[in-house]
Image (cartoon, rainbow, N blue to C red):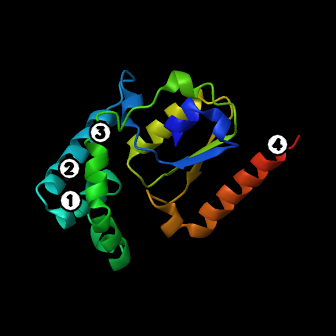
Amino acid sequence: SLGLAARRPDLFQCISVHEPPLFDVLAGTGSTGLETARERIRGVTERLAAGELELGAALFADTVVGQAGSWEIFSAEARASMVRHAATFLDENRDPGVFALDLERLAGFGHPALLTFGDASPDYFAQVVRRVAGVLPNGRVQVFRGAGHVPHHSHPAAYVDALTAFVLEAEQSSTR
């Protein structure tokens, strides 16, 4: 969605993203998070490519978006969903540009933008969010305290409240 916003800002009134995995925006920043994220995702994609969908999904939960033991605390429904989407994740990660974003072009996106992350997520997500928000003229960052990569599950009321307030504010500013 951020790539489309960079290319076609006319299609948007506002945009909100949570922890986009655009790790390439950290290149040249000295971030240790970039290589860490790539190594972890490489391990996941190797499992998935070997047909080990559940093991790959568990590794994703425990190393990419959470920490050791995350897979076990996810509900059975959440785990099943991750396994169902594992093949799509693998396909996405075979795209050489999956983690890239043209920040220069995105800087021309003048509409309101809300970028969020959970402070319990791996730090590279916060680094990406801050880097992307930093180029957006009307970008702002919101942190969900105590949340990880899925605040819509762990902190649904706070997540809905934040998004609702943002969209309502964006609608009001567009009618002025």
Q: Which residue is mark 3?
A: 95
Task: Give amino acid for label 4.
Answer: Ser
Mark 3 and mark 2: Cα distance apart in space: 12 Å
* Label whose residue precedes the other's in the sequence (3 or 2): 2
Image check: 138 left or right of 85?
right
| Contact flag, marks 3 and 2 (Cβ < 8 Å) | no
The quadrant of the image that shows the C terminus is top right
- In the figure, 98 relative to 168: above or below? above
Between disc 3 and disc 1, the foreground one is: 3
Between disc 3 and disc 4, the foreground one is: 3
* Label whose residue precedes the other's in the sequence (4 or 2): 2
Mark 4 and mark 2: Cα distance apart in space: 42 Å
* Label whose residue precedes the other's in the sequence (1 or 4): 1
- In the figure, 87 relative to 124: above or below? below
Task: Give amino acid for label 1.
Answer: Gly
For disc 4, the neighbor class at 10 Å (few under 14, some 14 to 19, many from 20) is few
Q: Residue at x 62, y 69 (%)?
A: 157
Element class at badge 4: helix
Front-most of residues 42 and 118? 42
- In the figure, 162 relative to 36: above or below? below
Q: Residue at x 39, y 41 (%)?
A: 124
Is residue 139 visible from the viewing direction of this image? no
Q: Which residue is mark 1?
A: 56
Front-most of residues 120 and 11? 11
Task: Give amino acid for label 3.
Answer: Asp
Q: Which residue is mark 2?
A: 45
Q: Which residue is mark 4?
A: 173
